[in-house]
Image: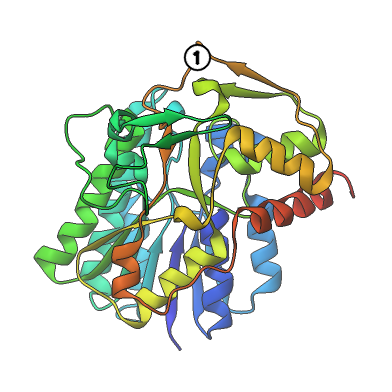
Amino acid sequence: MAIALITGSSGLIGSETCRFFHSQGFDIIGIDNDMRSYFFGKDASTNWVKDQLESELKNFTHFSVDIRNSEAIDNIFKQHLNEISLVVHTAAQPSHDWAAKEPVTDFTINANGTLNMLESTRKYSPDAVFILTSTNKVYGDTPNFLPLVELEERWEVSSDHKFFKKGIDETMSIDNSKHSLFGVSKLASDILTQEYGKYFGMKTSVFRGGCLTGPAHSGAELHGFLAYLVQCAVTGKHYNIFGYKGKQVRDNIHSKDLIDAFWQVYLNPKCGEVYNIGGSRHSNVSMLEAIRLIKEIKGYELDYTILEDQPRSGDHMWYISDITKFRKHYPDFKYNYDIKKILTEMITATEEKYLNK
């Protein structure tokens, strides 16, 4: 039986990946040590997801291992020598704000941890497909220097610019910009993964994600804006918007749509490829638009403050992913969720979690 090894297995993308590939007949090895609770506090813990996976998935084995521990990672791979056919590496320190608090922790998790995963795969399962969830923060703040136009509820790129129709593609420069320390550590992991594909011929693919979201997201103030926004609206908690008049735009891709992209790669892997992935023009929203939509969908009015003098350093004012390259390589990929469907599902899940205990 095929084995899929998933890091960050209790997180949003990791857990969805576990469930999907288990449904496809894989044995699942999950690696997650709940660092999210260390980053964002006990409310952001993902242990509840781990408990669900252990209860629901017959062929799921969990390891509470730190990806910085190369010996421990090696030992897991050695136990399944040449048996692992897929590695999906989602484990990371995910917040560019948090990274500035502990730069060494951030870099060693994101960069060194990825190197450990690549090396163990190369040594013990070299034929495995290796997928990395990277980030659009590898482009730094370069998107902010696009010709942006202020509209009533959002920033938008000028209609005569090449990125207007489909969004930002992989040709955007990663140089000479403010990335945040998080962006730097993720860029290191991104390029490492590409290089292991191009240099060693491994089947590696990198996904530079916009906002990855869904009902299993343990949102926190410094990460997972849509999940945390919904949580605050449903529970009546105050929400702070950091700068840009609340008009900053993100494209949002549902976790299940992203896992479908993983499946396409597994079926037809490449070596050292990189793809922008996100909701694209199909599914994107500004902060103010999301607040309005939540009210329209279920009547929740968010109590919020716009901290106009406190924009997050290096934050994007407008980012929409152009996924043309991925669709060219994988024409069978299609979206199942748009922004309204995503928000509706997240509101229902948040109500069940917080209001129906």
Q: Amino acid at mark 1?
A: Gln
282 or 161, which is in the foreground?
161
Residue 145 or residue 102, whichever sits in front:
145
Protein image colouring: rainbow
Q: Which residue is rendered at x = 45% and y = 27% of the image?
A: 97
- From where the camera sits, is residue 182 visible? yes
State the residue lying farthest toward the front.
160
Element on which disc 1 rests: loop
Q: Residue at coordinates 52% horizontally, 66% vertically from top-left?
A: 257
Q: Report which residue position mark 1 lands on.
A: 310
Q: Position of residue 344 (x, y in %)?
A: 73, 54
**Vertical comparison of 101 with 297: above or below:** above
Q: Which residue is most to the top?
A: 309
In-front residue for pair 267/83 = 267
Q: Quadrant of residue 124?
A: bottom left
Left or right: 87 with respect to 270? Answer: right
Towards the viewer: 330 or 182: 330
Q: Residues within 10 Å of mark 1 (few under 14, many from 20)?
A: few
x, y percent for residue 327: 35, 70
Percent position of residue 348, x then y: 79, 54
Asked if one can make out residue 8 in the rendered structure from this viewpoint, the answer is no
Residue drawn at 53 percent across, 14 percent down: 308
Identify whether 151 is placed above or below 21: above
